[in-house]
Amino acid sequence: MSQQPPLRHRIITLSLLSVAAIYFLVPVYWLTVSATKDTGDLFGTFGFWFANPHPVDYLHDVLTYDDGIYVTWMLNSLLYAGVGALAATLLSAAAGYALAKFVFRGREAIFNVILAGVLIPGTALALPLYLLFSEVGLANTYWAVLVPSVVSPFGVYLCRIYASAAVPDSLLEAARIDGAGETRIFGTVVLRLMSPALVTVFLFQFVHIWNNFFLPLVMLNDSDLYPIQLGLVGWQGYADRAPELYQYTVGGAFMSVIPLMVLMGVLQRYWRTGLAEGSVKT
Amino acid sequence: MKRPTRTEARNARAAFGFLLPFLAVFLLCFIAPIGYAIYQSLLKVERPAPLGIGGPTNEVWAGLSNYSHALEDERFINGFGRVLLFGIVQVPVMLVFATALALLLDAASARWVGFFRTAFFLPYGIPGVIASILWGFLYVPGISPLVEIADSAGWQVDFLGRDAVLWSIANIVTWQFTGYNMLVLIAQLKAIPGDLYEAARIDGASAWQIVRHVKLPLIKPALVLTTVFSIIGTLQLFAEPMVLRPLGTSIDSGYTPNLHAYNEAFTSNNQHIAAAEAVLLALVACVLSFGFLKLVGRGPRDGRDGK
């Protein structure tokens, strides 16, 4: 490969990157420190350092407050994001495969309509969707959040691009000549060949659903159905009347970001694979 | 057009089978709400009893009156002006920041790249609401160590003041999405064949010249993509102002178009006007993103060969 750039350049690069890293990490550091404090210490002590840390007690308080509603919210979030992303991945894979490997009239028209879906703000859809779901009695149920979450136009786009490159026509023909049905070919051959793209679609959709706030806010009334962020916003909004909720909001926020951070770190490799597919071929 | 052969007919049937599940939900959750919103936006509630209290209400045709009501609502229009101003400043700042980080990481020695990339990308995994709660604590006097440090340096800061709060929101959005955009740009940089740099270097190009004349033109497609997504994201601005709102007095119920529409529907119970506002919001998003794509000379799907 090329020779190393001069030392001066390397030092400048490293310092610039470090300054940026401080900017991105300081809030996370603050959250970690603050999760070990009670409400009094949150207000009374310096935010960037520890004071009387009792992290285990305080986090236990968060988990048991209000009959453990926090745990319900976490499980709801996992349900919405996990099941929603899984279903979204399967639907996107099938649709992307159909658009990539079959020739039929109206194919490009359908693809363009789906692509235009990427450009419509999700929040502009959520309000009318709520009105629509209320008409049929689906508002304020698990389905109200799950059903819209299984649509990922971006996933279809990614799967189409990936399938045209990664699924050879000759293999499909061979399987057909062997007498395999279309569903079986898709289930055994195609899904396996597309798996790197499927991991990416799953991750994107998981984070997308996990982070989505507007849809559950609009759809749900019953706090037992809330995903975690909706519950935490409720706590934060109520905290000036019940000060212990400051502590629970901070502790709850801390615990809720851990799963996603682990997911991001461990699976970074897959993010990049998928992003390369998505952007290079745009 | 030639008649379809048997294989083609079978193909079309199989393709339709694979497309059907996605299309069904897509129709229900994307196409139907748009249609329903347009329909609802053309109706209004007629209240037979004075003051609208008691008595049955029924929906009657309203024509475009909900739209003219929305467009005459100063706060709704101001909200649009606010997010446009926000977008004009925040989107370029964030993308320049993301590009700079991507190029720096591309040039940095390999040992540290993984750590920095993860650190920059981390905030993307934190939901907008949680990020807003988090930064809200870092903005509000009494808890915020930042305000405390500034105070002890004799510097009066008010992150939640009338003029400052928009840029405090911009900071939250930048913090969250810079790393994501950086990753998209890095992916594109990695896709550039290494011999291209080698050739430029042999021709005597400096590192800066390579950035300017080789790397930047080649990541243009990724920049276009991230700009379009950022424009759409900006127009949807909702969670950040909603979470920061109770912390001060600077944010009103119509601070962004989305907040306005939400409050119109759930606080004021004017779902027909809210529907009109949702339609207007989608319309503006489409016009702006297509306008931008036209401006840079590519449709959403053209230029696969990078021209």
Image (spheres, rainbow, N blue to C red):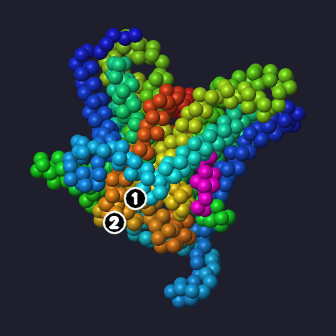
Q: Main SS of the magenta segment?
A: helix
Residue B114 visible in the picture: yes
Report x, y in % for residue B188: 47, 28
Q: Are marks 1 and 2 on the same chain?
A: yes
Residue occupied by mark 1: A235
Q: Secondary structure at mark 2?
A: loop
Residue A47's tag is none
Q: In the visual, does A26 lie left or right of A254?
A: left
Task: Give the total of numbered labels.
Answer: 2
Q: How much space separates mark 1 and mark 2, taking CA atoms? A: 10 Å
Badge 2: residue crowd in 10 Å (few <14, some 14–19, many ≥20)? few
Q: Secondary structure at mark 1?
A: helix
Magenta stretch contains residue A15:
no
- Tell me the quarter of the picture where residue B28 sits: bottom right
Looking at this view, is A169 or A56 the one in front?
Answer: A56
- Residue sticking out furthest to the bottom: B50
Q: Residues within 10 Å of mark 1 (few under 14, many from 20)?
A: many
Please provide the residue range marked out in magenta.
A139-153
Mark 1 or mark 2, earlier in chain: 1
Query: Residue B108: image x %, image y %?
Result: 33, 21
| Disc number for residue A241 | 2
Chain for mark 1?
A: A
Where residue B68 sits in the image (x, y, percent)?
50, 71
